[in-house]
């Protein structure tokens, strides 16, 4: 993938997108938004928990932290103890590794915007543009700060998605949830056995707070769904471990929908409803937009023509009585060799087309270089009559090598019926 700003091109494998084809990006953005909505309708904030770069990079930074400074308990012990040489060295190694990952991330981003092998060589030899060094430094700093230091604060305070997601969700979406019907009333293992002996209700939650301790946003999922929950699933694993140790069934915390949480409390069997109006709508929009993009890609021309009518004057009356309209024509040659194109017009009987610079009356043939666009001034003169003050006119462009046609529509303007 290459986003070539100076060359005004976007390359994706063998597909080359021109600035005039920016609608492909619009389509891709629509698909991305709908995919996010669909994910949310099916499995809540699955994007936040497993796919968002902020979560992925934070997890990577945490893995480095664990590797260098040990698990959470060891980190707390070290943080409350004195500053020893070992602690200083470990902190230094951790921050060095974080900076390396951040620098690698920033460098990788910049390589999307230039020829990667050349830029890597230029960066290494100090010959790359200052802008490239600046961007790598800025992206390194933001990655280091956001993933290393701010972590889930980004999700809670900076990211708009939790707010949007809350407005888009419904009672059938799966979310990380605590099963109140099973967990409550919570009591220690010993106390719950005693309660059961006395014939009193006792839930499976032993109030060990492991689910709270592992939560990166510091919330208690037993209080119900919360905006801060990024659905990382760490509380599910923590609680399952506890349940395994005390010999109780897993998934006291698990993926569940609001409707099923209610149904379980009422003693009703859970229901799954993935296919519903909103999931059908999102999937249909993705399929439709994807289909349109695919069709447009498969049928796109290897060359194209665009026409813009002069704004002022819209027509000129010539000395010989003819009415003349001026246009700006741009020909896009997306092929990798020079092509010759012949221009003709249709729609106005007797209209004569002329590309400025070519002799009038001769074949209006122009050349456009490989992978280039060229602008021409075009004049259309009407010596006979114009059927209306504004008549449709079609410009036809023929690739003289392949015989393939492209066309652009505009209007021919005249004061009134002219003879
Ligand atoms: S980890 Fe499980 S058992 Fe422990 S407090 Fe959380 S929900 Fe209750
Ligand atoms: S409540 Fe559970 S799933 Fe949500 S952020 Fe905390 S640990 Fe992750």
Image: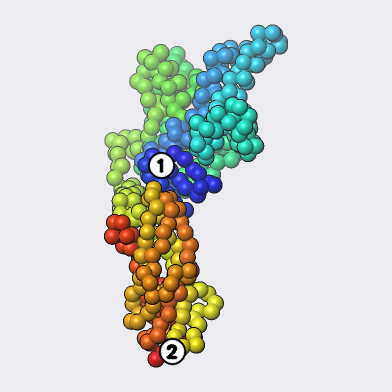
Q: Residues within 10 Å of mark 2 (few under 14, many from 20)?
A: few
Establish if 67 lies above or below 321: above
Ligand 2 has an atom within 8 Å of the beta carbon of the residue at disc 2: no
- State if disc 2 and disc 1 touch (CB < 8 Å): no
Q: Position of residue 95 (x, y in %)?
A: 62, 20
Q: Which residue is drawn at 46% across and 25% down?
A: 234
> In the rendering, at what x and y percent does residue 310 appear?
51, 73
- Residue sitting at x 45%, y 62%: 330
In-front residue for pair 230/298:
298
Residue situated furthest top in the rendering: 85
Residue 124 shows up from this direction? yes
Q: Where is residue 222 in the image (x, y as percent from the top left)?
A: 48, 30
Can you say whether 177 is above or below 160 in the image? above
Residue in the picture at 46% in, 78% down: 325
Label 2's element?
loop
Chain-order first, disc 1 or disc 2:
1
As displayed, is residue 177 above or below residue 317? above
Q: Name the residue under label 2.
A: 416
**How many numbered marks does the figure carry?**
2
Provide the residue designation for mark 1: 12
């Amino acid at each position: 993938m290459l986003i070539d700003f100076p060359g005004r091109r976007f390359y994706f494998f063998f597909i080359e997108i021109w600035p005039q084809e920016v609608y492909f990006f619009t389509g891709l953005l629509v698909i991305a938004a709908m995919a996010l909505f669909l994910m949310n309708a099916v499995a809540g904030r699955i994007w936040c928990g497993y796919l968002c770069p902020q979560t992925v990079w934070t997890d990577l930074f945490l893995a480095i932290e664990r590797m260098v400074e040990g698990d959470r308990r060891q980190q707390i012990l070290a943080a409350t103890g004195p500053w020893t040489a070992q602690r200083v060295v470990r902190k230094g190694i951790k921050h060095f590794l974080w900076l390396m990952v951040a620098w690698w991330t920033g460098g990788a981003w910049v390589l999307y915007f230039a020829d990667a092998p050349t830029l890597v060589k230029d960066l290494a030899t100090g010959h790359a543009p200052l802008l490239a060094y600046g961007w790598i430094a800025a992206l390194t700093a933001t990655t280091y700060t956001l993933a290393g230091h701010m972590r889930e604060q980004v999700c809670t305070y900076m990211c708009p998605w939790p707010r949007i997601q809350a407005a888009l969700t419904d009672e059938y979406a799966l979310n990380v949830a605590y099963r109140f019907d099973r967990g409550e009333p919570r009591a220690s293992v010993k106390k719950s056995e005693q309660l059961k002996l006395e014939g009193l209700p006792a839930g499976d939650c032993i109030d060990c707070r492991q689910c709270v301790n592992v939560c990166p946003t510091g919330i208690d999922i037993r209080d119900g769904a919360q905006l801060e929950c990024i659905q990382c699933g760490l509380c599910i694993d923590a609680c399952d471990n506890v349940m395994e140790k005390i010999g109780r069934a897993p998934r006291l915390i698990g993926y569940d929908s609001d409707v099923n949480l209610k149904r379980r409390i009422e003693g009703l069997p859970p229901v799954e409803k993935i296919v519903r109006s909103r999931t059908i709508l999102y999937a249909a929009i993705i399929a439709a937009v994807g289909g349109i993009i695919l069709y447009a890609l498969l049928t796109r021309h290897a060359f194209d023509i665009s026409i813009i009518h002069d704004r002022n004057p819209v027509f000129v009356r010539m000395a010989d009585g003819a009415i003349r309209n001026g246009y700006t024509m741009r020909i896009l040659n997306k092929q990798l060799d020079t092509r010759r194109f012949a221009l003709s017009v249709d729609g106005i009987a007797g209209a004569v087309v002329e590309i400025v610079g070519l002799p009038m009356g001769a074949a209006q043939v122009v050349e456009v270089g490989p992978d280039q666009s060229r602008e021409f001034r075009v004049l259309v003169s009407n010596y006979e009559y114009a059927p209306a003050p504004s008549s449709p006119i079609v410009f036809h462009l023929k690739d003289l090598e392949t015989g393939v046609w492209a066309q652009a529509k505009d209007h021919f303007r005249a004061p009134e019926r002219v003879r």
